[in-house]
Image: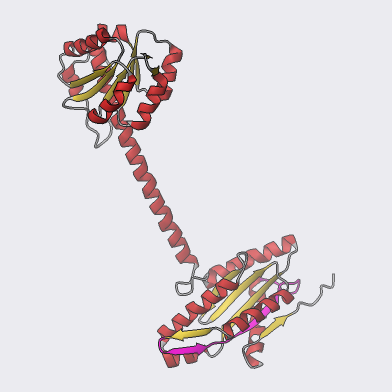
Amino acid sequence: MPDNLSPACLDSVQPSMDGVEPPSGKLRVLLIDANAADRQAVRHTLAQAGSPRYDVQECGQIADAWPLLVHLRPDAVILESRLPDGDFVAALERLAREHPDAALLVLTRHGDEKTAVRAMKAGAVDYLLKDQALADPMHLDWAIFTAVYTKRLERENARLLEALRERNRELEELNRKLWELSLTDDLTGFFNRRYITSRLEEELARSIRYRVPLSVVMVDLDNFKQVNDRHGHQAGDQVLKDVANLFRGSLRDTDLAGRYGGEEFLLILTNTDVLGAEAFCNRLRSRLERHPMALAEHTLQLTASFGIAEYGPESGTAEEIIRLADQHLYAAKAQGRNRVVAAVPKPSLN
């Protein structure tokens, strides 16, 4: 930016960000300098710039600045680097922390590059040599103006960034919900048939790779059609929700559950052989049998049949092991329902 830029030109500067206007009207400035003559010189220099834009309040030490800051809420704070009652870097850090909207400038006769770096790291927007600033009114005027404008841009950037972060959080939550909707059954909250089948393929591959047991369970609620016929489909839906919650409370975090269709569920019991799966299913079957289902004025006693297949060399694909578990489910139904039938794989010939 040219050094000879006039106040009129400054007022015509257009913002580089929509919604942020260049400073207009009077800017509130707090000047902290132990040297009264230098404070007067700063006032005189700003008056020479021909700009009535500043309302300047002043004090000689940092201790007197804090109540002024609360009252004035300055747009800019000009701080001398040598203070009689404290380290100016510590003062800058506190100013930046307690008054983050104020543009902080350091004005000093005793500056060096190292001190300037410390000041900027502590929160200063600009670091000015006093002799140069007081010798050129436009230089000081422009430094204060641009510092305030820069601070406003930073504040707007922070606001926009937070708005973007909030929007991203909303989008992430929406995407998570959409992802869940695409994978889960609306009624029970279990995985849907397509996804539970794909997860079974993954678990089979893991079982093969790490040589760990895996059992698949097909569960079907007994005489569920009678619930819908006698009490209506809304009652049937409520029963399915209750059953899903009961199952969910019994499964381990590593187990997987899906609604396979209607009143039929598919359970994947990881790191579980057929004997362990049989014991688990009998506990679950007994728990369901003893769990009353409350429906308005009625209470139902519901049971379920279970068919188990442990993955083995002859089990083949996910589709084949599901078919094997389903065959044992039908066997459980044929044997009188409310029971568990397990398939024990034949030992490998290898």
Residue at position x 18%, y 18% from top?
7
In the image shown, does 332 or 117 lie closer to the viewer? Answer: 117
| Residue 244 visible in image | yes
Q: Determine if the magenta segment contains residue 313.
A: yes
In this image, 326 relative to 183: left or right? right
Residue at position x 67%, y 71% from top?
317
Give the percent coordinates (x, y) of residue 267.
61, 73
The coloring applied to the image is secondary structure
In the image shown, does 214 or 72 lie closer to the viewer? Answer: 72
Does residue 260 sit above or below 202 in this rendering?
Answer: below
| Residue 12 visible in image | no
Does residue 33 sit above or below 92 in this rendering?
Answer: above
In this image, 49 relative to 254: left or right? left
In this image, 20 relative to 318: left or right? left
Image-quadrant location for residue 326: bottom right
Quarter occupied by the N terminus: top left
Image-quadrant location for residue 311: bottom right
Residue at position x 57%, y 75% from top?
247
**How many marks do you count on the picture?**
0
Quarter occupied by the C terminus: bottom right
In this image, 245 relative to 253: left or right? left
Give the percent coordinates (x, y) of residue 306.
63, 82
Residue at position x 62%, y 64% from top?
254
In the image shown, does 33 or 336 lie closer to the viewer? Answer: 33
Give the residue at the far right of this rendering.
350
In the image shown, does 61 or 176 lie closer to the viewer? Answer: 61
Give the percent coordinates (x, y) of residue 129.
34, 10
The residue range painted magenta reads 296-317
Q: Determine if the magenta segment contains residue 10.
A: no
Give the percent coordinates (x, y) of residue 146.
27, 22
Image-quadrant location for residue 316: bottom right
